[in-house]
Image (cartoon, helix red, strand yellow):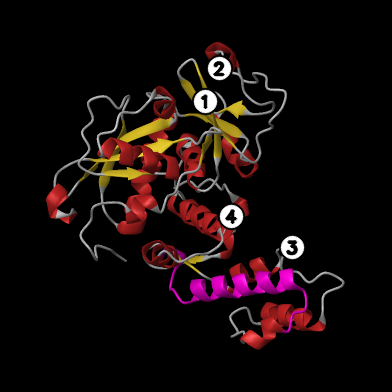
Amino acid sequence: MTASRDFWVSSGHHLLDRDAAGWLMVTDEFLKAYLARPELVPPNEACAAERRLHAALLAEPRRIVAPPEIAAVTDADARENWQMMIAWRDHLVSHETLEAAYLDIVRRSIRFPHLFIDQLVHLILRNMLEHCEDAFVVRAAELLFRPQKVRASDGFLIASDAETAPTSNPHPESPLYLLLGVQTPADVELLDATNAGSYWTRSDLFDMALDLSSGQRGAAALADVMTRWISHLLTVDVAIEPLPRLDGVAFSWYVGLDAEASRIGEMLWNGKPLDDATRSHLVGLYRLTFADPTCMMEKVRGEPVYLLAATTADDMLRLKPQNLIAGLPLHHGEVVH
């Protein structure tokens, strides 16, 4: 059997172990990687208490940290960083796996910095996609932990990474862009069949755009990612398919994949018409069906679930993968692992 492709090395997945079910287990090496972050490495002017704390954790990353040890750190910003870091570390090590830690955050609505949550989603996706050979699916998975800038042109929806895409001097870089007549940021290349092989070696650059237009591979790839996400975390088999339009769709249950989509979904649920401006923000509509409808709540058993994705007024797409966990109409207590 050929070896799996490596990608997203920046996730830190190589520092983790897996349990018998394939979920990620925290290691001391992984915890030490947090201690190497610039927010936690004591600067030259750091006080003795901060230096002692950092050194002690490098030697024993799981050691109990008493509140007075953090209170003794004189710099207020550093003290806050340590409080957040130790709370995060304690949450991770209190669970057998990272997946279990993530599910607990979602189910109990535990508040942690978005940066930490996005890193956790990044790792879980990297684990979930270990044997994936489809660059479109892996690129689509980036939408679950990295905000995207979506540009609409002549019916096409092109998503570029919001952090790495240049914001000035747009010009078409890819021949396909030229064919579609889509203006894109400089140095952003549209993922297509001709350049998909290059994705793997540049995956940590997050510099390839994805076409999310209806009927294109990007939309189907995102459906694939969401299917795998639900299967990996909930061990529930579903089928998800992108739909070309909203017309004629009758909601029995819906899940907004982001805050704007949740707002639009509520309008539709309440029978309110969408004006053209609001409708233009809707960039994804998917139908989800359960392989085994008996796992659903009785009142909607056998009915499809509709998934909505929408951009904000500034054309940003910020998907919330936790909504796929908390928003499905499953029996209470349906979980797994």
Tell me, yes or no, whether the highlighted magenta stretch contains residue 304.
no
What residue do we see at 50% from left, 43% from top? 318
What residue do we see at 49% from left, 65% from top? 111
Q: Which residue is mark 2?
A: 176
Disc 3 element: loop
Q: Amino acid at mark 2?
A: Leu
Lateral position of residue 51 relative to residue 311, left or right? right
Q: Residues within 10 Å of mark 4 (few under 14, many from 20)?
A: some
Most common secondary structure along the magenta stretch: helix
Lateral position of residue 98 relative to residue 240, left or right? right
Q: Residues within 10 Å of mark 2 (few under 14, many from 20)?
A: some
| Whether residue 127 can be seen here | yes
Spatial CA span between label 3 and label 4: 16 Å
Q: Which mark is residue 192?
A: 1
Q: Closer to the camera: disc 1 or disc 3?
A: 3
Location of the C terminus by quadrant is bottom left
Q: In this picture, is 211 found above or below 126?
A: above
Spatial CA span between label 2 and label 3: 40 Å
Q: Amino acid at mark 4?
A: Ser
> Residue 73 location in percent, x, y?
74, 80
In which image quadrant can residue 241 be found?
top left
Q: Amino acid at mark 1?
A: Asp
> Residue 26 location in percent, x, y?
52, 70
Q: Which residue is mark 3?
A: 38
Q: Earlier in the sequence, mark 2 or mark 1?
A: 2
Q: Amino acid at mark 3?
A: Pro
Q: Closer to the camera: disc 2 or disc 3?
A: 3
Question: Magenta region: which residues?
Answer: 72-99
Q: Earlier in the sequence, mark 4 or mark 2?
A: 4
